[in-house]
Amino acid sequence: MADSRKSSPKVAVITGASSGIGAATAQMLAAQGYAVWLGARRLDRLQEVAKSCDGRALVLDVTDSASVAAFAGQLPAGVDVLVNNAGGALGLESIAAMDEAHWLEMFQSNVLGLARVTRALYPRLLAAPSGVGHVVNIGSVAGHETYPGGGGYTACKHAVRALTETMRLEWLGQPLRVTEIDPGLADTEFSLVRFAGDAGRAAQVYAGMTPLTATDIADAILWAVTRPAHVNIDEIIIKPRDQARVDKVFRRP
Ligand SMILES: NC(=O)c1ccc[n+]([C@@H]2O[C@H](COP(=O)([O-])OP(=O)(O)OC[C@H]3O[C@@H](n4cnc5c(N)ncnc54)[C@H](OP(=O)(O)O)[C@@H]3O)[C@@H](O)[C@H]2O)c1
């Protein structure tokens, strides 16, 4: 009898797929034959992305346990790949001028949200049609370095690294893989969100340098998830050639 697991498309779930890295990942995985299930808060934007890759758009707020449960409940019983991508930075205040609302929101989405979604999908990942589930956490170079004004965001992304490593320890011996992808400067809506819609300030982040694109990151995610099942890519740090450290960027006049 034919093994039906081999013939059915692999299932990928991507959080924060309404823009940037999540949208590019959805499109790239779909182009490789994955059935893609997308989550984000802005359903109109998400539906546009879903249309472009024959995916399914489901509203998701990772800061809300009920929303995560409702999202998970609509997914197929088996999930091969979960890309925990939803998140971002808010503000650039020093610790002495900490904006509590910003910090709470960042920890809610980047850290707790990632853990919530992983917990909700864990049984589905264990039932991956391919036989091995794969969690890809989107961290950042901010999980390896710090910078003035980045206290809240860098603390969140350092926490993501701790969660990634903990998953790998807790799941040792189970049919699960865990990868973290840590981008440097990538031109998405990240800075626009960080600076509350101030397009001029967001543009300054990438002024005079060539940033990564969302597709560059999606490409790394695709590579990690398409390695043979016995291989676990632990971590990939990707920076633009114009960036040596998080705050050390070469800018042309
Ligand atoms: N761009 C960079 O330079 C860079 C560098 C390193 C790491 N990263 C990380 O890469 C990831 C993706 O960011 P991006 O650069 O692609 O920025 P982006 O274009 O702003 O995308 C962020 C995505 O996260 C979603 N999101 C935010 N809060 C959410 C929530 N509570 N529930 C569900 N979805 C939520 C947004 O969708 P909705 O608003 O529709 O919910 C959006 O789809 C983030 O984790 C970010 O920290 C980015």
Image: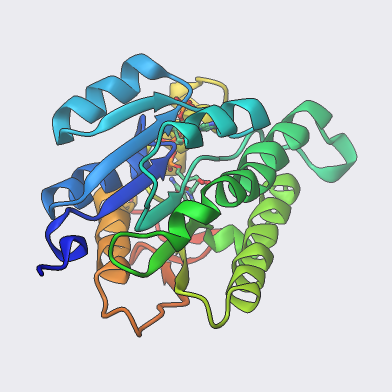
Q: Quadrant of the N terminus?
A: bottom left
In the rendered view, does 172 fall on the left or right side of 65? left
Does the rendering let one see residue 166?
yes
Does the rendering let one see residue 187?
no
From the top left corner, tell me how far across and down residue 245 is, in percent: 53, 67
In the rendered view, does 14 fall on the left or right side of 87? left
Which residue does the image show at 16% across and 67% down from the upper left? 3
Q: How are the residues colored?
A: rainbow
From the top left corner, tell me how far across and down residue 91 is, in percent: 66, 33
Determine which quarter of the picture holds residue 164: bottom right
Q: Residue furthest top?
A: 44
Q: Nearer the viewer, residue 212 or 155?
A: 155
Which residue does the image show at 30% across and 59% down from the upper left? 129
Q: Residue furthest right?
A: 96
From the top left corner, tell me how far across and down residue 206 is, in percent: 39, 44
Determine which quarter of the picture holds residue 2: bottom left
Q: Nearer the viewer, residue 179 or 174?
A: 174
- Relative to 195, is 10 above or below? below
- Relative to 50, is 127 above or below? below
From the top left corner, tell me how far across and down residue 159 is, in percent: 70, 59
Which residue does the image show at 61% across and 68% down from the upper left? 167
Which residue does the image show at 22% across and 51% down from the upper left? 29
